[in-house]
Image (tube, rainbow, N blue to C red):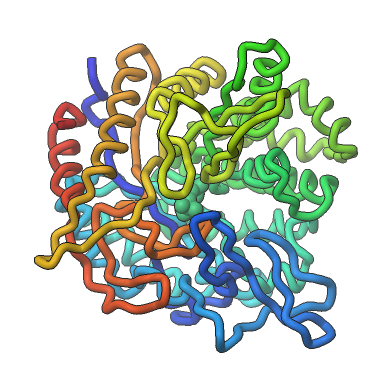
Amino acid sequence: MGFQKDFLWGGSISAAQVEGAWNEGGKSPVQIDYAAVGGTKGNRKVYFRNADGSRGECSLMGRLAPGAKYELFDDIHYPNHIASNFYHHYKEDIALFAEMGFTTFNTSISWARIFPYGMKGGVNKEGVEFYRNVFKECRKYNIDPVITLYKYDEPVYFEETYGGWTNRAMIDEFAEFARICFNEYKDLVNKWLTFNEINIQIVYRAVGVEHGDSQVQYEELHNQIVAAARSVKLAHKIDPKLKVGCMIAGVCVYPLTPDPNDVYLAYKKFQNTFCYCGDAMIRGEYPGFAVRMWKDDGVALSISEEDRRDMLEGKADFLAFSYYNSNCVTTHESGEHVGGNLMRGVGNPYLKVSDWGWTIDPIGFKYFLHLLNDRYDKPLFNVENGLGAYDVVEADGSIHDNYRISYLREHIKAMQAAVNEGVDLFGYTMWGPIDLVSASSGQMDKRYGFIYVDMNDKGEGDLHRAKKDSFYWYKKVTATNGEYLD
Ligand code: BG6
């Protein structure tokens, strides 16, 4: 009973959200470098210069208007330029992770540090050395890093040169980037994730956040799925000991009412938003219901024989996923809508919400773990789960974040119950152990960490680190392999 002896405990962050140093070490700009701060509704925008000289804007992961160019404007604060400045503080930060007893740690490699201008521009040695040093630092403390290759931060050079992921040249670019990473770091990193939350576009479609037409979105996603499969094959060829997982945003959907129409709608959302990608990457082929999705969305996807072979031969070794909240859907008139990391839906009268309107649902976590375990029969790894909140620094510098402890405690309890009921889960990395820039809102003040970083939404702060109450709590959790949760 309880978590397996070598269960991995840690935290998860991402390059663009913590590193800062946006134009140091040979890195080229990525889209998030042009994004401003939003608010509790997560409405951050990316700004650029239109062809006619006016200022244009799009949502994060949206597209440049034709003829437009990314540009920085003096009156805008760009939070990701500084972020938590992990780039210069990584030794201090990893030492703090080790003090909390981390046995694993998930971050991403910024593609723009390794290949700032694609294959044509060549490998940036400074970027390669930066990550080597980060991984060595982890190993110094016996932390087994789990590394994500892609977390939405490809160089803007690709968008300007290829027009983005619809161009199949991106598959070759990605495979080469993956090959370099596996070769360079295979002795330091043995667990990899290909694309973070690869289902993001499909989820955005489901909640009405439009990012271009459906044909383009499905083609982009297909190219990413093929790129991921090819990199799994590459990793296994380079070193059969390397394990490569896929990473899919957890979309936990409930019917708002027992009306069978609502029940079916909820199941369809799970199929569309999670299983379309999960099946393609874990089972190696698109599910039968994909035909319905393509028809509903007016898409004609051309899948070559080579793509089909790559998908079958490049199945992921394990299934990693994020879980923050659940949402309801209904075919009836509905009340208030709630937010979520990607999925949004109708409010659930049985659940409370965070300051950002995300439901807090630990039982949903247990339910979701079972769903995945039953469907995929592959080892599971939860790589993101956490609470964004406003923290108060007391006069003596202490931070009493019992709301965060409570959120994590209830989710870990639910996870433990699922494991005791037979779910095959081998690790948990909460999001994010150190304060960082929120992906959706761009806020530093939306804090997730056990470690406080002195930096606010206006770019004020000296970046010093401080331990919150949750820091000491998580240390006990890891020390007792999840037995101590009070
Ligand atoms: C996840 C993303 O979906 O949600 C993270 O992978 C993100 O990058 C996390 O930070 C929490 O969302 P947010 O918008 O509060 O930062």
Q: In which quarter of the image is residue 299?
A: top right
Q: What residue lies at 57% left-to-right and 70% top-to-bottom?
A: 35
Locate residue 399 relative to residue 244 in the image: left or right.
Answer: left
Locate residue 128 relative to residue 104 in the image: left or right.
Answer: right
Q: Position of residue 340 (x, y in %)?
A: 52, 43
Q: In which quarter of the image is residue 129?
A: bottom left
Q: What residue lies at 62% left-to-right and 59% top-to-bottom?
A: 176
Q: What residue lies at 68% left-to-right and 18% top-to-bottom?
A: 262
Q: Which residue lies furthest to the left in this view?
A: 396
Most foreground residue, 360 or 103: 360
Q: Where is residue 384 in the image (x, y as percent from the top left)?
A: 42, 42
Most foreground residue, 49 or 377: 49
Whether residue 481 can be seen here: yes
Most foreground residue, 60 or 346: 346
Locate residue 176 relative to residue 139 in the image: left or right.
Answer: right
Q: Where is residue 215 in the image (x, y as percent from the top left)?
A: 85, 46
In the rendered image, the quadrant that contains the N terminus is: top left
Q: Position of residue 160 (x, y in %)?
A: 75, 73
Q: Is residue 459 above or below residue 301?
A: below
Most foreground residue, 36 or 64: 36
Q: Give the mark count.
A: 0
Whether residue 148 can be seen here: no
Q: What residue lies at 39% left-to-right and 45% top-to-bottom?
A: 190
In the rendered image, the quadrant that contains the C terminus is: top left
